Amino acid sequence: MAPRWFEKVECKAKKLLSPSAPSPSPSPTPSQPASEPAARRTSQPTPSPPTSTDSETSPLPNLQERLWNQAYDDLKASEPKLVEAYEKILSVGLHRKDPSSVTCESTENEIEGARETRCRQMQQLVRDGLDRTQKAASIKRGIDEGLQAVQAVRGIVDKAIQAAPEAAIAWVGVCLGLEILSNPVTEARYNRNGIAYVLSRMEWYWNLVSLLLDENKAEQSSAGLRVQLEKHVVQLYEKLLSYQVKSVWLYHRNWAAVVLRDVFRLDDWAGQLDDIQKAEAAVRTDSDQYNTEQSKIYLRRLTDTASALEMNLQDIHSAIKDQTRQQEKRYQDAKYEKCMQDLHVIDPRKDKKRIQDTKGGLLRDSYRWILDHAKFQQFRDDPQSRLLWIKGDPGKGKTMLLCGIIDELEEGSNCLLSYFFCQATETQLSNAASVLRGLIYLLIIQQPSLISYLRSKHDVTGEKLFQGINDPTLKGAVLVVDALDECITDRPQLLDFIIQSSSTPSSRVKWIISSRNWPDIEDKLDSAKQKVRLPLELNKDSISKAVNTYIGYKVDRLACHKKYDKETRDAVENYLTSNANGTFLWVALVCQELADPKVRKRHTLNTLKSFPPGLDSLYDRMIGHIGDSKDAGLCKEVLAIASVVYRPITLDELKVLIESLEDLDQDDLEEIVRSCGSFLTLREGVIYFVHQSAKDFLLHKASDQILPSGAAHQHHAIFARSLEALSETLERDIYELGTPGFPIDQISPPDPDPLASIRYSCVFWVDHLDDSERQAKISDKDLEEGGIVHDFLRKKYLYWLESLSLLRSMSEGVKEVQKLETLVQKTKEARQLTELLRDARRFILSHKRAIEIAPLQVYASALVFSPTRSLIRELFEKEEPNWITLKPSVESDWNACLQTLEGHLARSPRTGGGTANRT
C-alpha cells in the first residue's frame, strides 16, 4: 500500500511542477470523502493547477519568488531578533562540510540581505538538507509509512526548487522541519504536530500563488479581490515562516542561546498553529469570491492529499521512537554479549568438571563428613556467619571437598552460587582480577540484571565488578574460591575485599574459601569478624575416614582392572591405609603407579613397598626412578620445560621447544611424557602437572637434577628455540585469508594449523628472554646490534603482529613490545635496536585496534597511515598493498602525545605449566 501511495504523491508533484501542466482532471466522486487517506485513494485523478489564459501574466516562479521573499522580509522586520537567530543557525549550515571553520561563539550571520545572494545561499541549504534527509532515510530503514511521508515531502521540495529556485527561501524551513520530525527526542507534542501540519500542507501553500494567475485577473471587477487575496497569501506565508523559524530555533536552542545570549519566549504552539489556520481560512474566503469552481476543486484535492500526508508525518516521530527503542535493545544485547566476553577468563563450571574427571569422579563418601560438621552447619544456618575458611596442607583434598560442597549447595538450595578455582601454574587463573571475573561471570549467567553494575568495559578489571554486592537479588548468594594460596597476583587485595564484604553488616553474600596453611593468609584472615575457621589438621579422624573410603574405592578399581585375588587386594589396601597419613594425593599417585601396564600383578606387592609415605618422599622416589630409565635425558628435558613455562603447553608446542624431540612422532611424545613418573599428566594433548606440589618439589628440591644449569639457562633456551621457530614459520597471510578486511570473528584456524606448534612461542618469547636476562644477564649478546632479536624485528615484525591477532593476543603483544624495549634500553650500545623498538611500540599502539579487528590490516591501513619516516613502514614498504595508488597524507613522525591505553606496564609474576590434580 505504501509504495503505491508514494508513487501517487511523486506523480502529483511532477504534474504540479511541470512547465506545462495538463488540464484539470474531473472532481472526486462522492464515494471518495475528503478525509480518506491518500494511501487508499488509488483511483483518484491527480490535480493540476489552472492554466492561465493571459499571456501578459508574470511567470508563476517569479510570482512565487516575490511573495515568499516579501513574507520573509516582513517577518524579519516584525521579529528581527528571531530572524537573526535563525540566520545564524543557517550560517552554521553553510559550513556543514567544514565544521571546523565555525564555532558557536564566533558564528556570524552570513545570510545576505540582497535577495539574489540570499537566494543562492537558500538553494545551497535546501540541497544540503535534502541530502541529509536522503542519508537519514537510508539509515532508518523499516519505518515504512512515516518514512515514506518524509520522502514524499522531500520529493515535492526537490521538484519545487527545480521549478522555482529563486523561491528557495520557502523550503529551507521545510528541510529543517523534516530533520526535527526525524529526531526521536524532539520537543513537545504540540510543536511536533504543528510541524507535521505545516509540512504536509506546503504543496497547498506553494500552489496558492496559482490562484493569482487565474483568468479572473483579466476582469477589472476582480482586481480589488485579487489585491486582498495576495495580501492574505503573504500574511499566511509570513505566519508559516514564523512557525518554522521558531521551531528550528527551539530545536537548536542548546547552542543558539550561546550565540545570541538571548532567550525568546517560544511557547503557545497551539495558538500559533491556530493563527496559521485562521490565515488559511481568510485565503479560502477570498478564493471563494475570486476563483473559478475549477480552481476550488483543485485546491480541495490538494487539501485532501495534505491531510493524508499530515497523518503519516505525525506517525514518523512515534515510528522512529519505536525504532530507537529496538536499536537500544539490540545495543544492550550486544553490550551484554561483549561484557560477558570481557568477563570470560575460563568457565568455572567446565574447570570444575575437568578437575573431577581428572580425579576419576567425585566420591560423595569422601566429602560428606563436612556436611555434618558443626562448623559447616554453623556457617550454613547462621546469617551472621558469612565466611567459611577451610585450610590444610597440600594433598589433603581441599579442592575435592569444595567440589562436593558446591554440588550439595546446587542441589539443596535456590540461592545463587558462584565459584572459582585458582591455579598458580596458569597466569590467567592466578590473579585477583580473574577470580572476580569468574565469580561475576557465573552470577550474571544466573541473574542477568546484575550486569547493570558493570558501567564500562574497564570495570571488569577489579573490585568495581562488585559494586552490586548488596543488590537484593544476591541475598543468600554463596561465593566459593578454591586455593587462595595459588592466587599469585594481588592476593592481599583480594583477601581485603573478601574480608570487607563478609564483615559488612549489610552484606548479602557468604564466602567459602580454601587455602594452604600460609602465614600471610592467616594474618589477613585473623581480622575477619564473621568467619568460621575449619582446619583439616584438627579433623584428622574425619579426614582419615574419608581417605580410607577413597582408598577402598581406588583399590576396588585396581583389583578389577588388574584381576587381583583377595589376598593381594587386601594387602594393597592395608599398605595404603597405613602410609597415607590422611593425604588423598599420595593415595592417588601410588594407585596411578600400580595401574601402569608395566607393573605386572606378580610384582604388585614389591612395587607397592617401594613407595615411601609422605609426598616429598614419594616424589623423591619418582625422580630417582626416572634417572634410571633409558629415556632419562629426554624426561628431564621435558620436566625442565614444564617447570618454567608460563602456561600448560601442548605436545606440538613441546616439540618446538626441545630440539631432541623433533624426529619423534605423536605416540613417542606421549610415551615420553608418561615416562616422567607421576609428575605429569596428559589431557587432550596438553601437558599438566599432577599437582602444584609436584612442581614445587621439582623447582625447590630437585632443581639440581632437572635444571643443572639453573632456571635462567632454561628460560634462555626456550627463548632461543622460540625465536628460531618463529623466524622459520611466520609469513604474510599465514591463514591465506586474501582480503585485508577479513574480520577476526569469521576466522577459524585451518587444518592443519600452521600456528599450532608456535602459539606458545608467539606470545611468551619475550618473557623468557626477560627472565633469562633478569636472573643471570646471559642475554646481552642477543640484544646487540644485528643480533637475533634485531634481525627478527627487521624481517618478521609485521608477520608476528598478524599472528598475534590471529591468536587473539594483541594485548599481550603490546606488553611484550614494551617489555622488550625496556630490556634493550639497558644495553647502551644497541642504539639502532632501541630506535627500532621505540618505533615498533608506537606502531602497535597506534594500530592495535585495526589489526585486532582484521589481522591483514597490519599490511594495509597500519602501514599507509603510519608516518612516512616510521622505521617499520620503511622496512616493510614492500608489503603495502599495490592497489592503493593514492596514499593518504600523513605526518612524517609519530605524534608526541601517543601513549598506551593498556594501563601501566606492571610485570605480572609468571609461573610455570598447569596442574591437573586439585586436592
Image (cartoon, helix red, strand yellow):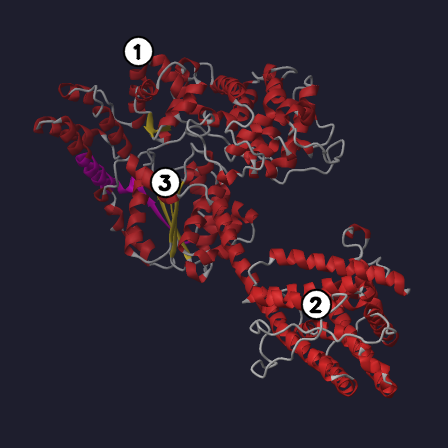
Q: Amino acid at mark 1?
A: Lys
Q: Is residue 305 above or below residue 779?
A: below
C-beta proximity under 8 Å, tags 1 and 2: no
Q: Is residue 919 above or below residue 614?
A: below
The Cα atoms of the two marked residues, 1 and 2, are separated by 99 Å
The quadrant the C terminus occupies is top left
Label 1 vs label 2, nearer the camera: 2
Q: Quadrant of residue 21?
A: bottom right
The quadrant the N terminus occupies is bottom right
Give me the disc on residue 351.
3
Q: Amino acid at mark 3?
A: Asp
At mark 1, the secondary structure is: loop
Q: Is residue 758 above or below residue 127?
A: above
Disc 2 crowd rating (10 Å Cα; few below 14, some 14-19, many 20+) is some
Earlier in the chain: of badge 1 and badge 3, it is 3
Left or right position of 855 against 223: left
Disc 3 crowd rating (10 Å Cα; few below 14, some 14-19, many 20+) is few
What x and y, as percent, mark residue 892? 76, 31
Membership of 544 in magenta stretch: yes
Residue drawn at the location 57% of the way across and 17% of the way down: 779
Q: Which residue is mark 1?
A: 630
The Cα atoms of the two marked residues, 3 and 2, are separated by 73 Å
Between 774 and 103, the residue placed more toward the observer is 103
Between 55 and 166, the residue placed more toward the observer is 55
Q: Quadrant of residue 278?
A: bottom right
Q: Which residue is mark 2?
A: 15
Part of the protein shown in magenta: 529-553
Disc 1 crowd rating (10 Å Cα; few below 14, some 14-19, many 20+) is few
